[in-house]
Image (spheres, grey):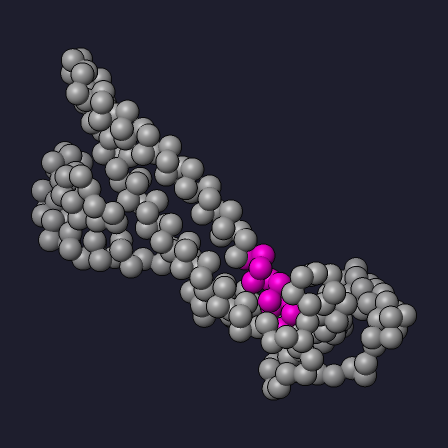
Amino acid sequence: MIEKKDIKELIQKEETNLNNLLTKEDMFNFKSLVDELRDTWTKKQIFRTETEARISVLQDAKYPTYASKYWQCIREQNVFLENLMSLSFDYRRNDAKIKWLEKKLETEKDEYKLECYKIDLDEKLYAKANMELTAKDRMREIQMWSNLKKEFNDGTFNTKDVNLHQLESYHQIMQNKVQTLTPGSSQAEVFNVLGQLKTIEREMSDKKLLQPSQPTFGIQHKTNGSLK
């Protein structure tokens, strides 16, 4: 039985067939690389690293407050939970097919069908190993988003209702966008950014939330959950 996430045995099992696919020189080179390829397959990057999450996803211009970063972590973590659950169903279905194929191999007499079942079984075993590797990295990213949620949850904002932080966060986002407008910006872009900013400031003024404008680029210090 193939152990979890052990690709070397699967590669070696396929060597006979690779002989038919590759030239002798390529096959010789492939065999010499089996251990290296196993290492590559095991440690390959599948999903985002923490550095990518912080810089590419939770970048300060788009998520300028701790609250906005926290709630984006919620969204990202939920996507990975949903995908992990879907992968679990695929894994169960794949396992059921493996069992079905193993039983077929015990009873099938037709040589062509027997060969097809063997190919299908090898393919399903390889798919199983890939699913296990994917599940491990999905779980790593779920845990990563959990750690980031804890980091950004500083107690200054509501963690039950996403709506409650959005006026302040969107205000800073639109201020950031205003700073990127240039004489070359299209009329539609200017109209959209300034229109949203004006609406946000009216809403904040009506709710007595509007404060004097402050710089929003970069993280110098934190006040009331805002990064300034």
Quadrant showing the C terminus: bottom right
Q: Secondary structure of the magenta portion, mostly? A: helix
Q: Which one is nearer the viewer's eye here, 182 or 169?
A: 169
Does 71 appear in magenta?
A: yes
In the displayed image of the protein, which residue is found farthest to the top? 110
Left or right of 144, for residue 60? right
Task: Judge whether 6 appears above or below 221 on screen.
Answer: above
Quadrant showing the N terminus: top left
Q: Position of residue 72 (x, y in %)?
A: 60, 62
Q: Position of residue 197 (x, y in %)?
A: 80, 68
Q: Residue at x 38, y 55 (%)?
A: 137
Name the quadrant containing residue 226.
bottom right
Q: Position of residue 28 (x, y in %)?
A: 9, 48
Q: Which one is nearer the viewer's eye here, 216 or 192?
A: 216
Does 197 appear in magenta?
A: no
Q: Which one is nearer the viewer's eye here, 48 or 168?
A: 168
Q: Which one is nearer the viewer's eye here, 133 or 160?
A: 160
Q: Which residues are magenta?
A: 66-76
Name the quadrant containing residue 193.
bottom right
Task: Judge whether 8 appears above or below 177 on screen.
Answer: above
Left or right of 179, for residue 92? left
Left or right of 225, for residue 55? left
The answer to whether residue 95 shows anywhere in this view is yes
In the displayed image of the protein, which residue is found farthest to the bottom? 220
The answer to whether residue 217 shows anywhere in this view is no
Q: Residue at x 54, y 57 (%)?
A: 76
Q: Residue at x 45, y 47 (%)?
A: 84
Q: Position of residue 140 (x, y in %)?
A: 40, 59
